[in-house]
Amino acid sequence: MPPLFRRLAGAVSAPLRRSLCTAASRPPWAMVYSWAALDASAAPSPGARVTFDLDAAPYISQISVPAHLADGMDFAAASVRATSSDGLLLLDLAETRHGPRAPPHLPDFVDTAMLHQMAAAGAATELDVTRFVCNPLSGQLFRLPVPDLGVAKTSTAFGLLTQPDGAHGPPDRFVVAQLSFRAGDNRAVVRRFLSETGEWDDQLPMPCFVPSRMPPWQSFQVHTSHDVLAFRGRLWWFDVTWGAISVDPFSNRSDIRFVELPQGSVQSDIDTKDKMLLTKRRIMGVSEGKLRYIEMCTEKEPFMIRSFALDNEGCCWKLTRESTVTMVLPNKAKPQADHLPWIAAIDPFDANILYFDLGHTVFAMGMAKKKAIQSRSCPDSIKALGMCRSSAFYLPCVLPTWLQSCYISSAGTISSKKTNRERKTLADILVRADRD
C-alpha cells in the first residue's frame, strides 16, 4: 500500500502568522481553539489553504479556513472537531441559518457570526455536514464526501484516527468515525470513512458487555463537550459522568470497550446543569504515552486535583498525583471568586503540566511544585463565551518535525490482495477543497 503521506522537499507550508513559528523554533504542540475562523481576505483559488495562527501554549492557536468553502450556505461556522496523534485535524463547516437570536446586554464583540458558531456545536454528530481532513502546517485541506447512510437515533461526535507508515513517521491511512444507534433496526454501528476505499460504511461491532452503571445502550449518548481522543489505535469518547468508550474503527468487526471512571467519580444520576459544570472540572487526554484522567474535586480554594493514568491493559486507573492547589498567577494575581478556574488541557509531553482557564487568562501550572509557570490573555471572542465554554474548546495538537514537509499523495493506486481489485487513488477519494 503506498503511504498516505510522502516527504516533500521544499513543501509549501500554511501561512504561519507569528514570527516565532519558523521550522527551527516551532513548538512541539499547540493548544488549538476549537472554533476556526472564516477568512475572506483572499480570493477563491484552486490552491486555497488554511492559515495557522500558531504559538506555544498557553497561547491559544487558531485555524482560519478560506471563506469561499462555505459558498452556498446562508450562515456557516467552521470548527476543529478532533486531532489525530500525529497532527492532522478534522474540521467541519456547518450551516447555521437557524442559529439563536442574540440575547440582550451582550458585549459588542459578541456578533452574529459568534452566535452561529455556538449554534453549530451540535453539528459534531450530524452526517450532512461538510467535513475536511487538514494538515495545519502545510495548509492542505481535503473534503470528505457526505455519507449516504441511514438515520440514527443517537450518535457520538466524529473522531480522526491514523495508522503510521512504520513505527515512526507519516501515517499510512486514516479513518473518520463515530458510534451510532441506527433508527431503522436498533443496531449499534461504527459509521466510518476509510481513506483506502474513499467510501462511508456501517460496521457492526462485536457483542459487548455494557457496565451496569452506564446509561442503557439504547439511549447511549456521550456528551459532545469533549474532543474525541486518538490513542493506541482506537478512538475514545469521554463522558464526564461515567467514563469512556473506545473502538478500533479500522477493524471490520471491532470490539467496543468501556472504562469506568475511578472509584468514587461515577455520577450516574445528575442533571444537565451539574453535568455542564463537570465538563469544566474533568478532562481526559493523552500525555507521555498514557491515557490520563484529571478531576478537580472542590469548587473553592484550596482546590483538590487528582490525576490518574490508565494501566497498560486498558482496564484500571492508577492514581498518579493528588494535590491541593491555591491558584496564584505568575504576576501574583489571584482568581476572583466569580471566575473559578477550569481545566483546559493536559500537556501532551509532560503530564506534570496542566492548563487552566480563568475566563480572561489561560495559564500553565506545574503540579509538582504547585506553581503557575506561564499565562496568556484570552482573545475577547473567547472571553465572551463565559459559561458556554468547556474543555472541548482547546484541543492539544502535536506537531511532529516531519508534518510540515508532508502532503497527501495523489500518485498510484491502492490494491486489495483479498479482492484483487483496483481501488481509487487518494486524488479520487478525497475531493479537493476547491471543487464542488
Image (cartoon, helix red, strand yellow):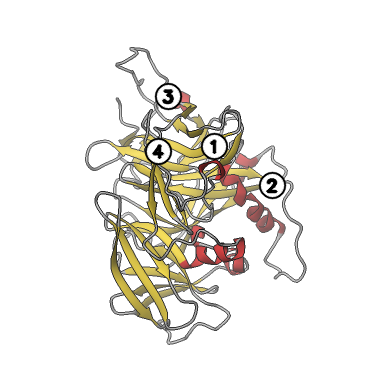
Q: Residue at image x 34%, y 52%?
A: 399
Q: Of the numbered discs in the image, which one, if any, rests on residue 181? A: 1
Read off the residue under disc 4: 208
* Rendering coords of residue 417 (x, y %): 29, 16
Q: Residue at image x 30%, y 51%?
A: 315
* Rendering coords of residue 420 (x, y %): 33, 12
Q: Check the image and report above or below for 78 versus 187.
A: below
Read off the residue under disc 3: 197
- Residue at the limit of the structure toward the top, as seen here: 420
Q: Nearer the viewer, residue 144 or 412?
A: 144
* Rendering coords of residue 45 (x, y %): 56, 37
- Residue at the limit of the structure toward the front, as seen here: 212
Q: How many residues crowd around disc 3 within 10 Å: few (fewer than 14), some, or many (20 or more)?
A: some
Read off the residue under disc 2: 96
SS category of the residue bearing label 2: loop
Q: Nearer the viewer, mark 1 or mark 3?
A: 1
Nearer-N-terminus badge (3/4): 3
Q: How many residues crowd around disc 2 within 10 Å: few (fewer than 14), some, or many (20 or more)?
A: many
Q: Nearer the viewer, mark 3 or mark 4?
A: 4
Which amino acid is tagged 4?
Answer: Cys
Nearer-N-terminus badge (4/2): 2
Nearer-N-terminus badge (4/1): 1
Question: What is the CA distance from the residue labelled 1 to the residue labelled 3?
Answer: 23 Å
Nearer-N-terminus badge (1/3): 1
Nearer-N-terminus badge (1/2): 2
Question: What is the CA distance from the residue labelled 4 to the residue labelled 1?
Answer: 14 Å
Q: Quadrant of residue 383?
A: bottom right
Q: Nearer the viewer, residue 55 or 310?
A: 310
